Each structure stands twice: as structure tokens, then as C-alpha cells.
Amino acid sequence: MKLLFMFILLVSISTNIGVFASTNSTSDPFEWLKNLFDKGVSTVQDLGSYLLHQAIKLLLFLARIVYIVVALIGVILWFSGLQPYKGKRYTIGAGILAMAVEILNMVL
């Protein structure tokens, strides 16, 4: 436990020395704090954009599964004669959904 504390203390001191050494005595005394805040904000923005990108990829993957299942159900209903009108509507809807998903995939 003491070794971990010493390591964290050493790392924090070494990073703070670099931050304090980069400031000029004639500049704003809180410039290092502004830089630290800017780095934090940019890190949060990068994380947010990464999570949003991953969420969009997941939704596109799920939409692909949905349009494949709906198309299969539509084809089965249409060609089996059980409910041909509903099967035709499912198949057309799945085709429209497939086109929309693939266009979104190309754009995003």
C-alpha cells in the first residue's frame, strides 16, 4: 500500500513539475490550471464522441438484424399464402429500412 502511495505521489509531483515549469513568471499565475482544465474538457469531449460513435454503430447493427428478420417473416407470410398482403407490406418495409440503414452507414 505504501509503495502504491509513493508511486502515485511521485507521478503527480513529476507531472506538476512539468506544468509549473512551463509557466512563465510574467504570465497568468493560474495558466497551468487553465491548461489542465482545457485538457480535461478535451478528454471528456473525445470520450463522448467515441461513446456516441460506438452507440451509433450498435444501433445500426441492431437495425440490420431487425430488417433481416422482418424481411424473412414477410417473405414467409407472403409466399406461404397465410397473409399475403401483410407479408408484402413487411417485405417492402424491410427493404425501405434496409436502404435507410445502409445509407446512414455510408454517411456516418
Image (cartoon, grey):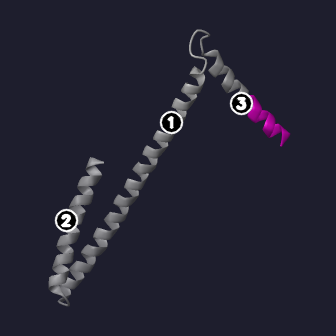
Q: Nearer the viewer, residue 44 or 101?
A: 44
Task: Evaluate if marks 1 and 3 touch, with contact meaning CB atoms under 8 Å apart.
Answer: no
Q: How crowded is mark 1: few (under 14 residues within 10 Å), some or many (20 or more)?
A: few
What's the residue type where badge 1 is placed? Val
Helix, strand or loop status at disc 3: helix
The verdict on residue 9 being magenta is yes
What's the residue type where badge 2 is placed? Ile
- The residue wearing badge 2 is 96
What's the residue type where badge 3 is placed? Val
Give the magenta-colored segment's residue range. Answer: 1-11
61 in relation to 43, above or below:
below
- The residue wearing badge 3 is 11
In the image, residue 68 lies at what x, y percent?
29, 70
What residue is rendered at 59% in x and 11% in y? 24
Mark earlier in primary sequence (2, 1): 1
Task: Evaluate if marks 2 and 1 touch, with contact meaning CB atoms under 8 Å apart.
Answer: no
Helix, strand or loop status at disc 1: helix
Q: Residue 41 carries which label?
A: 1
103 in relation to 90, above or below:
above
The verdict on residue 38 being magenta is no
Q: Which of 3 and 73 is in front in this view?
A: 3
Estimate the spatial distance between the alpha carbons at disc 2 and disc 3, rounded to whole Å: 56 Å
